[in-house]
């Protein structure tokens, strides 16, 4: 039988949103408990160079997350290496159960479980992640100046990534398994009008080709969905842009979701459909998905939680006065 722990504020998730929420909550003397989850540090731990974090010309993603964790600890956050497997938001205090067997109860909750890029699931994709394979053009496009890249996908994400990459690459090949795009028409118009872009229809990615020493991508092997014929497209970088999956499994039947599973928050806040439950970062953000915006939302979530907890504490006094 596991232990039971109570805290005023439970933060679930340990990316930029979670750690920033922890820093602000600690400064508000809320004594928060942060449960790191299955991937401590979030998506930045699988990113190499980060060049768009304010204040750092360049920083390694894992190093940045180590610093964020240390900052949260220094402020007084209790950080626990556990994975929340169930979360009950039907009554207060809210109750979460960890994989360790520990039960966490909390007066308020900040959800910062993030979102994961969807991957193709082929073995060579995993092999070259961080060495020419990426799921974030905004993060890694800069490294392909003067080089050729391939993007796979056919929706808004893929087209936006491809257009962004034309700022750096000499050629961008967009590979789609169908014969028409699923993006907004204005985006398709811009894509077709860009001389750096080549569209390859009715093809699936079968294998990512590359070298081992040093590790790097040299091309992709594609298969025609109609004829089965295979061919190779040379490239220096490969970007997967088939969408993102928000990590909202814990709350999918409890909170209001939208845009394919992202937690819906009130405009201009981090308040969810349940009072006392706040959400921040990529779990709610289907538009920007950047570390800096996630951190900003983590700040908002902590402040929103602080104000809500203050209101709850003041409520009995108001009733007594009446």
Image: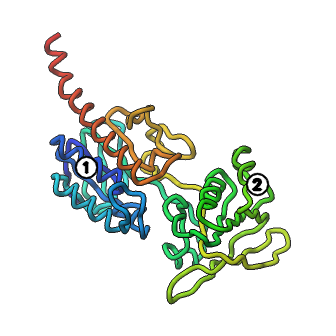
The dot on residue 22 is 1
Residue appearing at x 47%, y 38% in the figure? 264
Q: Which residue is mark 2?
A: 192
Q: Dot 2: what SS? A: helix
Instruction: Find the residue positioned furthest to the front.
Output: 146
- Single out the mark in the foreground, 2 or 1: 2
The answer to which quarter of the image holds residue 297 is top left
Visible residue check, residue 138: yes
Residue appearing at x 65%, y 65% in the figure? 151
Residue appearing at x 17%, y 10% in the figure? 322
Binning the other alpha carbons within 10 Å of mark 1 as few (below 14), some (14 to 19) or many (20 upward) gives many
The dot on residue 175 is none
Q: Position of residue 254 (x, y in %)?
A: 44, 40
The answer to which quarter of the image holds residue 146 is bottom right
Q: Position of residue 192 (x, y in %)?
A: 76, 54
Classify 317 as above or below 272.
above
Q: Position of residue 64 (x, y in %)?
A: 32, 63
Binning the other alpha carbons within 10 Å of mark 2 as few (below 14), some (14 to 19) or many (20 upward) gives few
Q: Is residue 230 left or right of residue 143?
A: right
Q: Dot 1: what SS? A: helix
Q: Is residue 10 left or right of residue 57?
A: left
* Colour style of the rendered protein structure: rainbow
Visible residue check, residue 87: no
Instruction: Find the residue positioned furthest to the top.
Output: 322
């Amino acid at each position: 039988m596991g232990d039971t722990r109570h805290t005023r504020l439970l933060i679930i998730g340990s990316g930029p949103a979670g750690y920033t929420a922890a820093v602000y909550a600690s400064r508000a003397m809320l004594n928060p408990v942060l449960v790191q989850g299955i991937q401590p540090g979030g998506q930045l731990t699988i990113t190499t160079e980060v060049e768009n974090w304010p204040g750092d010309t360049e920083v390694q993603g894992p190093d940045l997350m180590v610093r964020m964790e240390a900052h949260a600890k220094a402020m007084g956050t209790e950080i626990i290496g556990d994975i929340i497997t169930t979360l009950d938001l039907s009554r207060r205090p809210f109750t979460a159960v960890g994989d360790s067997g520990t039960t966490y109860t909390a007066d308020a909750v900040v959800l910062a479980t993030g979102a994961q890029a969807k991957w193709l699931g082929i073995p060579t994709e995993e092999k070259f992640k961080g060495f020419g394979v990426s799921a974030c053009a905004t993060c890694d496009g800069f490294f392909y100046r003067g080089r050729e890249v391939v993007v796979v996908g056919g929706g808004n994400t893929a087209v936006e990534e491809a257009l962004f990459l034309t700022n750096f690459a000499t050629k961008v090949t967009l590979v789609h398994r169908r014969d028409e795009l699923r993006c907004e028409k204005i985006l398709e118009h811009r894509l077709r009008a860009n001389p750096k872009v080549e569209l390859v229809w009715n093809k699936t990615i079968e294998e990512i080709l590359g070298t081992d020493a040093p590790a790097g991508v040299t091309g992709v092997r594609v298969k025609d969905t109609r004829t089965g014929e295979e061919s190779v497209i040379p490239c220096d970088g490969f970007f997967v842009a088939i969408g993102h999956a928000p990590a909202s499994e814990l709350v999918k039947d409890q909170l209001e979701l939208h845009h394919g599973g992202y937690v819906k928050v009130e405009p201009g806040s981090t308040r969810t459909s349940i009072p006392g439950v706040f959400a921040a970062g990529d779990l709610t953000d289907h538009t920007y998905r950047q570390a800096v915006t996630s951190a900003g939302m983590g700040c908002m979530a902590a402040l929103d939680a602080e104000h809500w907890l203050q209101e709850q504490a003041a409520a009995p006094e108001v009733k007594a006065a009446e």
